Amino acid sequence: MKAGRQTTLRDHAAVFGVGVHSGLSTTLTLHPADADSGIIFVRSATAEHPEREIRADVRAVTATEFATVLGDSSGPLCSTAEHVLGALRGLGVDNAVVELDGSEVPIMDGSATPFVDAIDRAGLVTLSAPRRYLKVLKPIRVVQDKSVGELRPYDHGFRVEADIEFNHPMIGRQKMAIDVSPDTFRRDIAGARTFGFMRDVAKLWGAGYALGASFENTVVIAEDRILNPNGLRYSDEFVRHKILDAVGDLALAGAPLLGAYKVSRGGHRLNYAVLSALMADRSAWTMVDAEMPRRTRGHADVATGLVAPAYGPDVS
């Protein structure tokens, strides 16, 4: 394992947009946090409700039907957390506060790119504490109807292998495998947008979902074509977006994973079920610290202000 220290944001950065399901406007602000804080979601105080905060881990998940919802015994705190979580984990941010003044993380353009841009504006700094990894020790497998998800040991970092299959000419069968690092996440995953079928719109609206969906934030699929004027960003954008969701959902492990996730026909519900099964089996994982870099005598410590490698060998 490469040496590495924990990271946080250098400064604050904010984004503003609507929730894809609620249709309501929300400002999301990313803040620095101390070492060992992890990712904390904070809902700003209002006249009706006091400020609330929740650490982003699997125990905070309250729903996974169309998005990942975080909350506690007093109710949901925020929904659609997966894209900002994916951006933070994908870029190797260990500690941050995610503050919202609404009930849903804004969907932005449907991808993680706006959150990546916000993290870049804030900048990253390294902290004195070593990065802690959650290392998968044995395979954990969950089957839900035709969907299968498995976490298994993988000593070279964090890998996602995904395949999807839709009975639709614009999607069909798509597969992708990737070792997730800041470089590969930026280039291959962050820009993949959420997608939906035009035939499902009325049903979703009737159930109170997708009220903020539009061509600006969702790839909309008709019977025989993509309705967005600019088309797709990648020929296999659909499976890439599934990987983005998986990176965000598995960030709820509370630490970077050392393991490989293989998922077939997956979604938020399956990602949550696999991670829950892993965490419930204490013999299936352990926490390990990254090796701290050695000082070179006669040279200044130049680590401060630099981003430590996020994952294992050859994937950073």
Image (cartoon, rainbow, N blue to C red):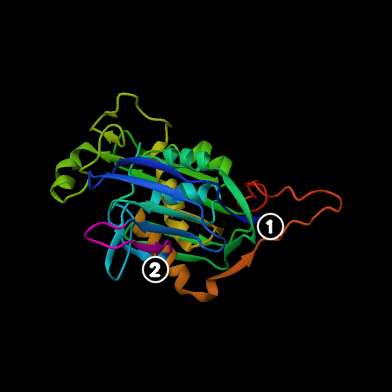
Q: Residues within 10 Å of mark 2 (few under 14, many from 20)?
A: some
Indicate the amino acid at tag 1. Answer: Met
Q: Quadrant of residue 77?
A: bottom left
Q: Nearer the viewer, mark 2 or mark 1?
A: 2
Residue 56, located in which quarter of the rendered image? bottom left
Judged left or right of residue 111, residue 294 is: right
Circles 2 and 1: CB distance less than 8 Å? no
Mark toward the start of the polypeptide (2 vs 1): 1
Q: Is residue 81 above or below residue 62?
A: above
Q: Secondary structure at mark 1?
A: loop
Residues rendered magenta in the picture: 45-57
Residue under label 2: 59
Q: Looking at the rendering, in which quadrant would you find the N terminus?
A: bottom right
Q: Which mark is residue 41?
A: none
Q: What predominant SS class does the magenta segment belong to?
A: loop
Q: Residues within 10 Å of mark 1 (few under 14, many from 20)?
A: some
Q: Could you say which is closer to the camera, residue 92 or residue 197?
A: 92
Query: Residue under circle 1?
Result: 1
Name the one closer to the observer, 177 or 126: 126
In the picture as drawn, the residue positioned furthest to the right comes out as 298
Q: Is residue 141 above or below residue 182?
A: below
Q: Residue at the top extreme?
A: 229
Which percent across, then down, holds residue 287?
59, 68
Which amino acid is tagged 2? Arg
Q: Is residue 55 one of those drawn in magenta? A: yes
Side of 72 where 201 appears, left or right:
left
